[in-house]
Image (cartoon, rainbow, N blue to C red):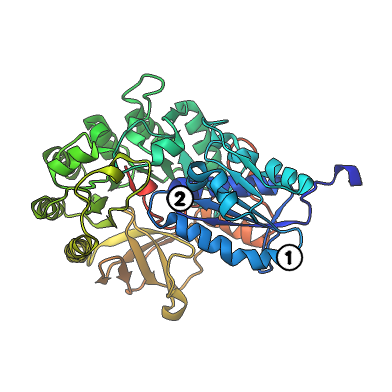
């Protein structure tokens, strides 16, 4: 290769720091793919030449967290000539030039609609020796057409839509991600088939509101059809999706879940509040009865379904009676788990200016009561799994204590985390192991009985191949390569 054809990024390294929801996790896979396609390599131990912050704007402390981390990086950059810092994601879309004013050592600021511009912006900042701020108001190109570096080879995110058409009063995401844009079903299925061909066994269909999928091309049954079409893909063993909105949850989707064998018996459906008055103030277009009715239908069709949710405590105007309605709904729904949040005021949202802001100490006390109740229910629901035989998809990096306990970890079909006794034969991430549950905790199961059947898979083969060739970039153009969703980030923006 001649000097003229060498990429300006050749020999430079990068690190991406991701905050927030699955959308951001998947966007970071694309950012990594873009950088590696441009010639950068992932930093391994040493200080990186480029640090990218992929930010979230949903929680109140997002700003403080970003600027604190940027402050810690300033002396690192001072002693590392040529180092660059880029800030993208939802907070960048919101704050724009403010970031460079508050942290003038930042080199690049880019938004949610133009992540594909990052390599060019970095090079422009280097040549011009000044910060580059580029924020687009609408989606530049559908992100799934960008290069992608997947993290591991047995499961993958697959975006079916971006943006959101809802107007929840607590949520800033529609303003930052834009209105809903849907991919055509053929494009989604082609991506899934390409992933399966490379070894992927599990996909998670991803969108701000997945069961509104099809609104852009006028087919309200599109999501149920997509689930059923996934069932026709040979070699695809597990299909999940996140996050649906109760307003759009229709009976045809429940039927598709129940009748499509590779659609897993798990559902994450945000509740946010059990109080009809609070739901109305949130502009959530369903009420407690409607929500519990969906739960009842799902359980009738899929008796073993594990259902999880999001709940906000302390929304403006929430009374003690409102909060009791949330506790009542939690008792009735018997969620296997819940992401619980204390209401966070976000400038630019209608809720930020509402009367009746609940005092912090009241919110904290209610939050603790909710968490205690949900822990009790989660533990009871997990104890119902004792003695069950489960086929677990072996995961990488989900069991922090596995080395000390000589266990492996993975996910059951209903997405419960299972730590299990290491089998007597070699097992790789991506392989399947049948185990018997011997112990239940609120947030995981343990299987310490001898493992049953070990089923080697194509995904395990792909994982082994990646270990044998660690320098491989795992990047493709157009159709992303294999990978696995990061373990249990916050639900999609915590807002749906």
Name the element at disc 1: loop
Residue 462, quarter of the rendered image: bottom right
* Image spot of residue 66 (x, y percent): 51, 57
Q: Name the residue at the top extreme.
A: 218
Q: Name the residue at the right extreme.
A: 2
Determine the residue positioned at 48% across, 45% down: 90
Q: Nearer the viewer, residue 181 or 303?
A: 181
Residue at numbered disc 2: 56
Name the element at disc 2: loop
* Quadrant for the C terminus in the image: top left
Q: Taking 343 as reference, is 396 left or right?
A: right
Residue 143, quarter of the rendered image: top right
Q: Taking 172 as reference, is 119 left or right?
A: right
Q: Taking 125 as reference, is 444 left or right?
A: left
Residue 80, numbered circle = 1
Q: Nearer the viewer, residue 401 or 385?
A: 401
Q: Nearer the viewer, residue 46 or 64?
A: 64
Residue 458 visible to an observer of this rendering: no
Pointer 2 with pointer 1, Cβ within 8 A: no
């Amino acid at each position: 290769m001649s000097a003229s054809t060498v990429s300006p990024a050749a020999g430079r390294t990068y690190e991406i720091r991701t905050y927030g929801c699955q959308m951001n996790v998947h966007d970071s896979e694309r950012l990594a793919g873009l950088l590696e396609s441009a010639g950068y390599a992932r930093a391994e131990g040493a200080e990186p030449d480029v640090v990218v912050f992929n930010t979230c704007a949903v929680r109140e402390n997002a700003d403080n967290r970003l600027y604190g981390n940027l402050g810690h990086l300033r002396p690192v950059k001072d002693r590392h000539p040529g180092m660059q810092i880029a800030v993208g994601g939802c907070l960048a879309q919101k704050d724009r030039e403010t970031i460079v004013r508050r942290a003038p050592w930042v080199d690049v600021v880019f938004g949610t609609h133009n992540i594909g511009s990052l390599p060019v912006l970095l090079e422009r900042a280097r040549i011009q020796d000044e910060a580059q701020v580029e924020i687009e108001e609408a989606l530049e190109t559908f992100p799934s057409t960008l290069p992608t570096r997947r993290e591991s080879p047995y499961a993958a995110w697959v975006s079916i839509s971006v943006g959101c058409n809802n107007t929840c009063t607590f949520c800033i995401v529609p303003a930052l991600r834009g209105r809903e844009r849907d991919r055509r079903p053929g494009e989604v299925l082609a991506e899934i088939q390409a992933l399966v061909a490379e070894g992927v066994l599990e996909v998670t269909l991803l969108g701000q509101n997945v069961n509104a999928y099809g609104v852009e091309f006028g087919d309200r049954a599109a999501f149920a059809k997509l689930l059923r079409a996934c069932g026709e893909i040979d070699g695809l063993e597990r299909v999940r999706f996140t996050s649906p909105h109760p307003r759009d949850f229709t009976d045809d989707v429940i039927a598709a879940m129940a009748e499509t064998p590779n659609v897993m018996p798990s559902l994450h459906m945000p509740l946010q509040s059990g109080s009809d008055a609070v739901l109305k103030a949130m502009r959530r277009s369903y009420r407690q009865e409607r929500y519990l009715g969906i739960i009842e239908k799902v359980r009738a069709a899929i008796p073993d379904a594990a259902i999880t949710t999001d709940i906000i405590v302390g929304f403006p105007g929430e009374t003690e009676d409102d909060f009791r309605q949330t506790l009542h709904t939690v008792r009735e729904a018997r969620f296997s788990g819940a992401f619980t949040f204390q209401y966070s005021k976000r400038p630019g949202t209608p809720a930020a200016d509402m009367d009746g802001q609940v005092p912090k100490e009241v919110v904290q006390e209610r939050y603790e009561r909710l968490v205690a109740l949900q822990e009790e229910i989660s533990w009871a629901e997990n104890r119902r799994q004792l003695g069950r035989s489960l086929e677990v998809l072996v995961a990488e990096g989900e069991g922090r204590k596995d080395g000390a306990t000589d266990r492996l970890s993975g996910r059951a079909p209903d997405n419960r985390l299972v730590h299990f006794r290491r089998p007597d034969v070699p097992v790789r991430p991506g392989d399947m192991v049948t185990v018997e549950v011997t112990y239940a905790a609120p947030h995981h199961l343990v299987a310490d009985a001898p493992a049953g059947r070990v089923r080697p898979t194509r995904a395990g083969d792909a994982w082994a191949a990646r270990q044998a060739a660690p320098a491989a970039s795992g990047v493709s153009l157009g159709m992303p390569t294999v990978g696995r969703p990061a373990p249990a980030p916050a639900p999609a923006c915590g807002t749906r």
